[in-house]
Image (cartoon, rainbow, N blue to C red):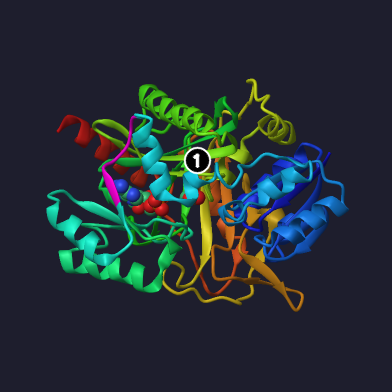
Amino acid sequence: MKVLAVGGGGREHAAVEALYRSGSELYCVMKNANPGIIARSKKHLLCDEKDVNRVVAFAKENGVELAFVGPEAPLEVGIVDALEKEGIKCASPTKDAARIETSKQFMRQLVRDHGIDGNLSFASFDNADDTEAYLRTLDHEIVVKPVGLTGGKGVKVQGEHLHSFEETMEYVHEIFDGNIGGAGVIIEEKAVGEEFTQMVFVDGRNIIPMPLVQDHKRAYDGDVGPNTGGMGSYTDADHLLPFVTEGDREDALRIVQSIVDALAEEGCPYRGVMYGQFMLTVNGPKIIEINARFGDPEAMNVLTVLRSNFEDICMRMATGTLGDGVEFAKAATVCKYVVPKGYGVKSESGHEISVDEEAIRGCGAIAYYANVDMKDGKLVTGTSRSIGVVGEGPSIEEAERNCEAALKHVKCDAIFVRHDIGTRELVQRRVDHMSALRNA
Ligand code: AMP
Ligand code: GLY
């Protein structure tokens, strides 16, 4: 089938590989020349992914039947609504359904209005004075977020990034003065625990879960530094995580199902991949954010072990016929992102980077190209994450070793990697942290 895929990052390269394995004939739109995606495309178009008219024209010209949109930005401007108007089926949500990600205020309010578990107390504001007045009434730690989209980088947590009332207000002013996210500020109660990602396939009503993943948002080893889009992630062979029980996972799935039900009741049924990020606390999973797409890097973990036909799953999501029967290999994965020097603060870009794909495969791993570009015939780094390397193995430890061996075959003189992701030491720290909280 002719399939349109939108987006040029690691997540989209992983989705394109899965579609290619399924037999799709691919028509891809991206802003950067991602060589991994281009290699699998029958045709590609380099353009702004939010340029709805150009993307729709490209899809029509090539007679595509089904579309898959990777990033959130084109969803926010209604790319799915426009494609559907042309009769193209979409395995991604409409603009209204995507508000579950594009407005953090919409998400929290929906969860509150529908009495869904897992919410955190919150309030949103359109000016700094009201925010300050509210903050003065609180006696618990909070998190400051722009309401709108910021590419995963706008969140600051009290006690981690914000160490005093003054610092908190400084950041609130920064958001309003810079109009960061474009829609005001939301203050949320800070949840304490261990984070995990539950992604599901959704067809408007029904969900099918994917393996649980743990991402690492902080830029540097030891979970310190600024929040990033995600530095790397792992999955376990049993599709749970070492600190998450089957019961915790069922709680998270119940929350996600309730959100899907609520969106249908609100008249904007959700189709596509939904991403639930949770903090596992002593009181069960709490919602950190819901995204209208695959996580990046999480997509690279789960799509690497997806054994079912992804084109078929996309069609089932798009047409409300999800059913069941999606299979993932019982293997663990560890993904580490190679990112440009300065990433998280101020990236250096334009450095030549080389990837020996065959040597990487020889290590039991796979490389997904992300924010890289072709300049004068050379592969160069962009300002965002460069290459995702996913090691696979029977355990997290072995997957991690394969990933590390493979990373030696990515060469560039202006990059860094969080080498601690998926190591026995860091995973054990998560388990110990969770049991300490549970036993306290
Ligand atoms: P987000 O972009 O919303 O996923 O937030 C980025 C990171 O900030 C998350 O991965 C968490 O580590 C942290 N965070 C966000 N919201 C909260 C919250 N309400 N409580 C504690 N940590 C949070
Ligand atoms: N890895 C987090 C996200 O995709 O939002």
Q: Residue sitting at 27 percent across and 41 percent down?
A: 193
Count every numbered label the image shows and give the total. Answer: 1
- For residue 318: magenta? no
Nearest the eye: 209 or 262: 262
Type of amino acid under label 1: Tyr
Q: Residue sitting at 81 percent across and 56 percent down?
A: 58
Q: Residues within 10 Å of mark 1 (few under 14, many from 20)?
A: many
Nearest the eye: 81 or 209: 81
Instruction: Name the quarter where the C terminus is drawn.
Output: top left
Q: Which residues are magenta?
A: 117-123
Q: Is residue 420 visible?
A: no
- For residue 120: magenta? yes
Where is residue 345? Give x, y as percent: 41, 71
Asked whether, in this view, residue 344 is left or right of residue 350, the answer is left
Where is residue 256? Give x, y as percent: 45, 31
Height in image: 422 above or below 393? below
Height in image: 100 above or below 34? above
Majority secondary structure in the magenta region: loop
Where is residue 270? Give x, y as percent: 57, 35
